[in-house]
Amino acid sequence: MKAAAAAIISNLLFFLIIDGALCLENPQDLPGVYEVASNGQLNISIADIHKYEIAGQDGWFLAIGLVIENRDIRPILLSSNSFRILNARGEAILPSTDIALKSPLVFRELGVGDVAVGGIAFKLQDEDEPVALLNTDTQLKIRLDKETRPPGTPLPIGEPAKIGNCIVGIEGISRSNDGTMLRVDYIMKNSGPGIMLLKPRDYGRFGSLIDKFGWSYSACDYKMLGPAVAPGGIVEGFMTYIVPNSSYPQYLLFWPPDEDAILFDLGADAI
């Protein structure tokens, strides 16, 4: 499981949600958890995905919100034309320009360390079953037949987990009396030899909360001590999430800076 550029994840994670990518009515949200595709130079993750029926017409539109991070040592060219949908018959479907996106992924040069967020639309036939999103420049794929549980082995809360140069632990989970707000307190230690720098965008993308149905939620509020953590230093913080009262938060997908993700099983503590 690769480190994410931004939340998620997900409707994942990690973290920037493109709300209503299309100028069409009655979108059908497709919940679930999507793996992050990475080759070490480029990280591609799905922020959200929506299905739009076409009234009075054959076929339907699939709108995918993407978060793309350039982790290479040189700039790269970014284009929506580099993406394809692969259907169950093995056919590659090109992006569609028949509809207007609110936040389209535009052709641009993506600098070293930069992150791009934008949507791409595809027009599919009624019988099409989308299987994967393909980037033709890198051959990176993200499966669209998603799981309701993130990839990886869930770790229990209360037990610090080592990942790369970080040690992370969930210290506690609390829920408001009306059940609509969940707070996760965590602690993170820099176990590496160098200084751990927390960039401003890191503050809001550390954790994606996922319920048992596959819906994911980004933090609505968060606090962390930083921004530079010396070797052996410890930072404490919290993330709060607004969730439906009927939801059952199940997992927390946590991304320490510049590391792979850690999956925590919240269990009964979050109900």
Image (cartoon, rainbow, N blue to C red):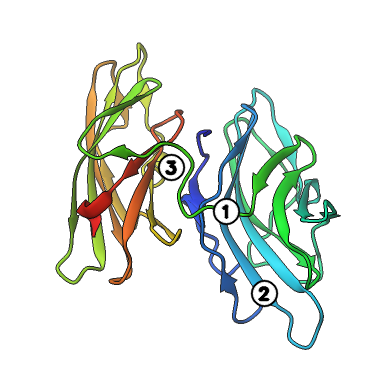
- Please name the amino acid that badge 1 sits on: Lys
14 to 217, vertically: above or below: above
Give coordinates of residue 122: x percent, y percent.
76, 63
Q: Identify residue for label 2.
A: 52
Give coordinates of residue 217: x percent, y percent.
40, 58
252 to 187, vertically: above or below: below
CB-based contact (under 8 Å), mark 2 and mark 3: no
Residue 235 sits in which quadrant? top left
For the question of whether residue 92 can be seen, the reply is: yes
Mark seen at residue 85 = none
33 to 76, vertically: above or below: below
**Residue depth check, mark 2 versus mark 1: number of the one nearer the observer:** 1
Residue appearing at x 43%, y 42% in the figure: 201
Whole-number angstrom distance, CA of label 1 to CA of label 3: 27 Å
**Residue depth check, mark 1 versus mark 3: number of the one nearer the observer:** 1
255 to 83, vertically: above or below: above
Mark seen at residue 146 = 1
Q: Identify residue for label 3.
A: 201
Whole-number angstrom distance, CA of label 2 to CA of label 1: 18 Å
